[in-house]
Amino acid sequence: EPEVTQTPSHQVTQMGQEVILRCVPISNHLYFYWYRQILGQKVEFLVSFYNNEISEKSEIFDDQFSVERPDGSNFTLKIRSTKLEDSAMYFCASTSHSGGAGNIQYFGAGTRLSVL
Amino acid sequence: SQQGEEDPQALSIQEGENATMNCSYKTSINNLQWYRQNSGRGLVHLILIRSNEREKHSGRLRVTLDTSKKSSSLLITASRAADTASYFCATDRAGANSKLTFGKGITLSVRP
């Protein structure tokens, strides 16, 4: 069964360092998302991406964040200068949004980012 | 106010019993979905119900939607220890690229 793949599963970084979180969405999907979940809290939307551009972003997604689809398969989230409060589980999701399936978003297993 | 708030916050039941989890939301929606998350893992899609549907079944899952009350319930029948997880409702609004807005989740513990 096709799945969304995220790497690495765990990333440890020093405050102020840049990190890139990688995702391979399901191959025929067109819409891509990043969400994050701070430990013990709910999942929060960060950004959506379609047709090689950002469709929507949340207040969390400030100038320190960027997304890119560098080739036909990868979808990356970059945090330019990490802060302690960026520590969270980051989830990538994708959907084909075909009319019959509605907006079922398929999630990867997540990358746990620990900022020290 | 928060979109997609579940109750109870935590639920502990015996294997074989039914588990009912509720979700309320504030704004108009296009779809409401339920996801499961095992401890420290990713989100697994369980079931989607559209705003013009009232009830949907999938295996041991039954979801209802009452748009007049802006609420949904997820029923898991004949629960198993493997159903132990956190359950989240998530809503989206009209539009092809609609983000999901999640509730805080319900922690379900099924005792063997």
Image: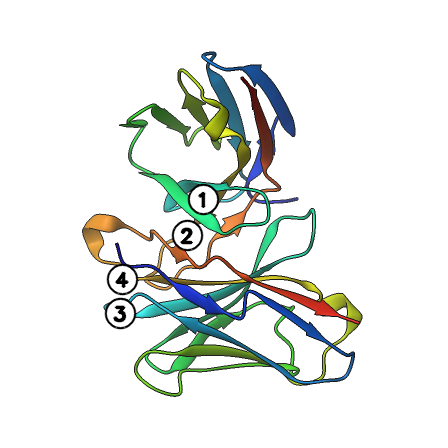
Q: Decide: is B10 above or below A24.
A: above
Going by the numbered disc 4, the residue's amino acid type is: Ser
Q: Which mark is residue B93?
A: 2
| Element carrying mark 2 | loop
The chain identifier of the residue carrying mark 2 reads B
Q: Is any atom of residue B50 visible in this view?
A: no
Q: Which mark is residue A96?
A: 4
Q: Quadrant of residue B56?
A: top left
Where residue A29 sits in the image (x, y, percent)? 28, 67
Q: Nearer the viewer, mark 3 or mark 1?
A: 3
- Mark 4 vs mark 2: same chain? no
Going by the numbered disc 3, the residue's amino acid type is: Ser
Q: Residues within 10 Å of mark 1 (few under 14, many from 20)?
A: some
Q: Is residue A15 left or right of residue A109?
A: right
Going by the numbered disc 2, the residue's amino acid type is: Arg
Q: Decide: is A80 above or below A98.
A: below
The chain identifier of the residue carrying mark 4 reads A
Q: Nearer the viewer, mark 3 or mark 4?
A: 3
Q: Which mark is residue A27?
A: 3
Where residue A1 sits in the image (x, y, percent)? 26, 54
Q: Decide: is A47 above or below A2.
A: below
Q: Residues within 10 Å of mark 2 (few under 14, many from 20)?
A: some
**In the rendered structure, which disc, 3 or 4, sits on the residue that comes first in sequence?**
3
| Viewer-proximal residue among B102 and A39 | A39
| Element carrying mark 3 | loop
Q: Nearer the viewer, mark 2 or mark 1?
A: 2
The chain identifier of the residue carrying mark 3 reads A
